[in-house]
Amino acid sequence: MQQTKTEAEADHTNRAPRTMVAQLVLWTLYVVLAAAVLAFLAVLLPGPLFHIRILSLGGAFRSITLGAYGGLVTTLLGVVLLPVIWVVHRGARRFIAPALVIVLGGIAWGVPYMWLKKGESVPPIHDITTDTRNPPQFLPDVVALRAAAHAANSTVYGGAKVAALQKKAYPYIRPMLFKLPASKLFTAALRTVKGMGWKLDSEHPHLGIIEASSTTFWFGFTDDIVIRIEAKTDGSRLDIRSESRIGKSDFGRNAARIMRFRAMLYRNLGLHPPAP
């Protein structure tokens, strides 16, 4: 039976508020999605922009901080919007946008939060060495290279305070002792440096010194490495030092680098590394 004019008008009147609510929810979702995209970009882009010198380090960190908080807010809003979308807009395709909000916002919040927790779990030092009493020294050319790059951190070792912090956090960072000639160890260490993908800055077999540098992918931070090899009566000893050019804390990066080098060096020598 056909609806009367009055019934049709009543039905239209009832639908109008529901349509307005549905449109409001949809536009809210689009705004939140746009905010999640901006938060994601605010965290993603500062690294490359700092790397190419468009953004200062302070500006980069402020952008990441804002992006992280934006990511947290949009993630929470995305979680709230999911059931609302289920009630107001049936259909699987309607869930793509809130799911995207949660993913982008979660990344924008999660990555900086992960690095924050990592920074809190390691000491605020940026210079790690296997020999804290007599650390390997960078040669003048690398010191000049750091100066030309406006390195904020000095190559002068921090002394007993830094040594104590390192020993507590990384007790397994120790000198490496081998029962083989220093010349053979030097060759293996040089091959390991190249295998690590580091930039070889200098090699001095007569001094037993190898210098290299490693640049991070995202921000382009450069850390300098110096390796010292000494002959001993019963073999040879290798010490390595890895220091960041910038930043009070290295977030554990230098210690991890030394341990990766250690593992690869032993593998190149066909030896099993001793337990940490």
Image: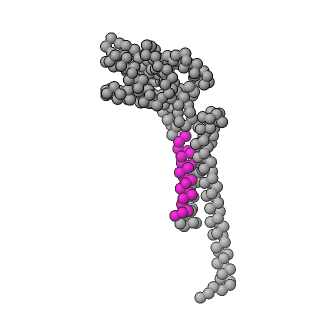
Q: Is residue 208 above or below residue 89?
A: above
Horizontally, residue 179 falls left or right of residue 32, namely: left
Residue closer to the observer: 6 or 233: 233
- Residue 206 lies in the magenta-colored region: no
The tally of labels here is 0
Picture coordinates of residue 186, whole percent (x, y): 40, 19
Picture coordinates of residue 181, whole percent (x, y): 34, 16
Residue closer to the observer: 118 or 126: 126
Q: In this view, does 95 lie above or below 55?
A: below
Residue at 55 percent of width and 15 percent of height = 140
Q: In which quarter of the image is residue 11?
A: bottom right
Return the residue found at the far bottom.
Answer: 1
Residue at 64 percent of width and 73 percent of height = 15
Residue at 38 percent of width and 26 percent of height = 265
Quadrant that contains the N terminus: bottom right
Horizontally, residue 73 falls left or right of residue 5, namely: left
Examine the rendering and report whether any part of residue 258 can be seen.
no
- Asked which colour scheme the image uses, the reply is one colour
Residue closer to the observer: 24 or 154: 154
Quadrant that contains the C terminus: top left
Horizontally, residue 68 falls left or right of residue 266, namely: right
Q: Quadrant of residue 68?
A: top right
The rendered magenta stretch, by its main secondary structure, is classed as helix
Q: What's drawn in magenta, residue-wise? A: 92-112
Picture coordinates of residue 45, whole percent (x, y): 60, 41
Examine the rendering and report whether any part of residue 207 can be seen.
yes
Picture coordinates of residue 101, whole percent (x, y): 57, 53
